[in-house]
Image: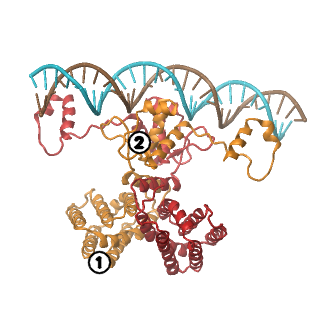
Chain colours: A orange, B red, C cyan, D brown
Amino acid sequence: MSQARSRRAAALVPAVAVRQNEPEAPLFDPVDRDPAYTRVAAAIEAKILARELRAGDALPPETELAQQFRVHRSTVREALRRLESAGLIKRPRGAKRMVVSRPAAAQVASGMRHALVLHDVTFVAVWEAMMVIEPEVAALAAMRRTQADLAALAAAHEAFKASPQGDPHAVEIVARFFELLGAAARNQVLVLAKQSLTRALAPSLARMIDTVPQARSRISDAQRKIIASVREKNVDEARRWMSKHVRDFKRGYEVAGISPDTPISA
Amino acid sequence: MSQARSRRAAALVPAVAVRQNEPEAPLFDPVDRDPAYTRVAAAIEAKILARELRAGDALPPETELAQQFRVHRSTVREALRRLESAGLIKRPRGAKRMVVSRPAAAQVASGMRHALVLHDVTFVAVWEAMMVIEPEVAALAAMRRTQADLAALAAAHEAFKASPQGDPHAVEIVARFFELLGAAARNQVLVLAKQSLTRALAPSLARMIDTVPQARSRISDAQRKIIASVREKNVDEARRWMSKHVRDFKRGYEVAGISPDTPISA
DNA sequence: CTCGGTCGGATTGTCGGACAATAGGACAAC
DNA sequence: GTTGTCCTATTGTCCGACAATCCGACCGAG
C-alpha cells in the first residue's frame, strides 16, 4: 500500500522512475483515478452497508452533502442516482429528502432478469434452475407452512381456476402461487432467486399457456396436489409434485412448439 | 391517501372531481410525474433491452442525447449514472464514450449481496440455499464437464492445498472452486445464483476456516472426492459429496461457535 | 518508412450559479 | 377541526463554462 503510493509519487518525477526496471511485479499499478461521483457513491454506500446509516434514515440534503464532500451538487446528484438505482436509497412518494432503504426483492429480481435477457439465456437454462430450486422450496414449505400460508395458497389457486381462458393475468397468478410458496418456505435467499426465475419466464410462459389447451387444467391439478401435500406437511410428496409441475412446463413448451433454446427475450 | 390524491387532482378540475365520490376504485390513478432523469433512463434502457442498442455499441455523446431528449446535459448524466449502476452501460477504461454492456455476473451478485446483508439474512438461510443449489450443480457438472473444466478444478484444488495455514486468500480459492464447478455445469442461471451465495458467505467462511483446525483438511478431502466423481461422470456421487461438503460448512460453524442465526454482515 | 512528438477536435468530469416547483410546517380564518 | 395562506427547505432542471483527456491526423527525425 504505502509502496504503491510512493511508487505512484515517483511517476510524477520521471528521472527516478526510468532508472529502476525490475521485470517482475508490474512496477506501476494502474493509477486509480475514478471520477468523484463514484467515490461519493462509494462513501455513502459504505456507510449504509456498515449500518451507520440505517434503512429509513433521511440522507442530508444535497447541498450539505456537496459541502461535506467538497464537490458540486451536480456531482452529488450523480452519486445519488447510482445508489438509487442500486436500491440503497429512494425517495418515498411525495417526500422531500432521500431516505436510506433496503433493496426490494423486486429490484434484485429485475436486475437478474436484465442480466439473463441480455446474456441470451435460453429457456432451458432457466427451466433447469427452476427444476433445481422449486422442488426443494416446496419441500421446505411443507415443513414450515402456517395456516395463513395455506389460506393464501388456496386463494391463489382459486384465483387461477377462476381466471377466464385467455386471461393475460393468468400468468401473474401462477407467479403469485410460486411466490407464496416461497414465502411459506421461510427462506429469503431462495425467495430472491425464485422470483428472478419466475419473472424471467413469465412472458414466454404466457404464450405457452395460451397456446396449449390442456395447460390450464394441468397447472390447476398440480397446484391442488401441491397445496394438499403442503397442508399435510408431506415433504416428499410436495417435492415430487412440484417436480412434476415444473417438468410439465417444459412439456408445454414442446407441445406449443417453442424451442427450448429460445432466448427469454423481454 | 386517496383523499389526499383526489384533493390534489381536484385542484386541476374542480367541478368534475368534487361531484363524484364513490369510495371504491380510487377514481384517479396517481398522476405519474416522475423526474426527467428517470424517463431518460427508462427510454435508453428500453432500447437496450429491445436490442436496438447492442452490447458494445457506443452511446451518442451526452450533448447529443441532451438535444434529442430536449433536456439539459446534467439530466442526461443523471440518467446515465442510473444505467451505469445497473450495469447496462459502462465506460471501458480509458474510453471516451459510454458503451452498452451486459451486466456482469459479479454485478448481479453484488446486488444480491447488498440485499441479503441489509435484510439481515442469516447464515443458515444462505447455507440452506447452498444446500439446495450446490449438489445439483455438482451433478450437472458431472454430466457436462470437459477436460478443460477438470484441469481448472484440479488446479484450484492444488492451490487450496498449497495455501499456507491462515492464508487470507484461502477463502477466495474455495470460492473459485465453486465457481469453476458452476462453469462446468454450463448453466448461466445457476452460476449467477451460486456466485451470490458464495460471495455472501465468504467473509464469515474465512473466520470459520481460521478458527476450526480440521476445516482445511476436510475441505481438501471433499474437493478431491468431488473432482473424482466429476471426472468419472458419476452424477450421484458428485451430488452426494457436494452435499456432504456443504453440510460440513454448517458443522464448521457450530464447532467454531458461530451461531447459525448470525446475520451475514459485510 | 517507421517511430515518437505535436496539435486540434471531441467529450467527459466538474464546477459555479440560477430558478421554478413543491413538501412541510406554522398559522390564521372559517 | 378543516381549509386556505405564507414561509422555508430542498429538489428538479437548466445555463454556461473550463480543464483534462482521448483520438486521430499530421509531421519531422532517424
**Residue at the (48%, 30%) spot, across then down:** A67
Q: Position of residue A145 (x, y in %)?
A: 27, 69
Front label number (1 vs 2): 1
Label 2 packing within 10 angstroms: few (<14), some (14-19), many (20+)? some
Q: CA distance from mark 1 to mark 2?
A: 46 Å
Query: Based on the displayed image, in which of its 4 quarters is residue A134 positioned?
Result: bottom left
Name the foreground residue: A168 vs B152.
B152
Q: Is residue B59 left or right of residue B22?
A: right
The amino acid type of the residue labelled 1 equals: Asn
Q: Does residue B229 appear in this view?
A: yes
Residue that label 2 marks: B42
The chain identifier of the residue carrying mark 1 reads A
Taking the image as drawn, is residue A266 in sight? Answer: no
Q: Is the residue A123 above or below the residue A244 in the image?
A: above
The front one of B81 and B66 is B81
What residue is rendered at 60% in x and 37% in y? B96
Left or right of A179, for residue B64: right
Helix, strand or loop for disc 2: helix
Q: How far across and how far down the image is residue B36, in percent?
A: 39, 34
Location of residue B233 in the rendering, given as x and y in whole percent from the top left corner: 56, 79
**Residue nearest the observer in this picture, B60 or A165:** B60
Q: Residues within 10 Å of mark 1 (few under 14, many from 20)?
A: some
Q: Residue at x 41, y 53 (%)?
A: B118
Count of numbered circles in the view: 2
Q: Which residue is mark 1?
A: A234
Query: Are the two marked residues, 1 and 2, in contact with CB atoms closer than 8 angstroms?
Result: no
Residue B23, quarter of the rendered image = top left
- Chain bearing tag 2 is B
The residue under the point 55% across, 63% down is: B206
Q: Nearest the camera: A50 or D5?
A: A50
Residue A84 location, quadrant: top left
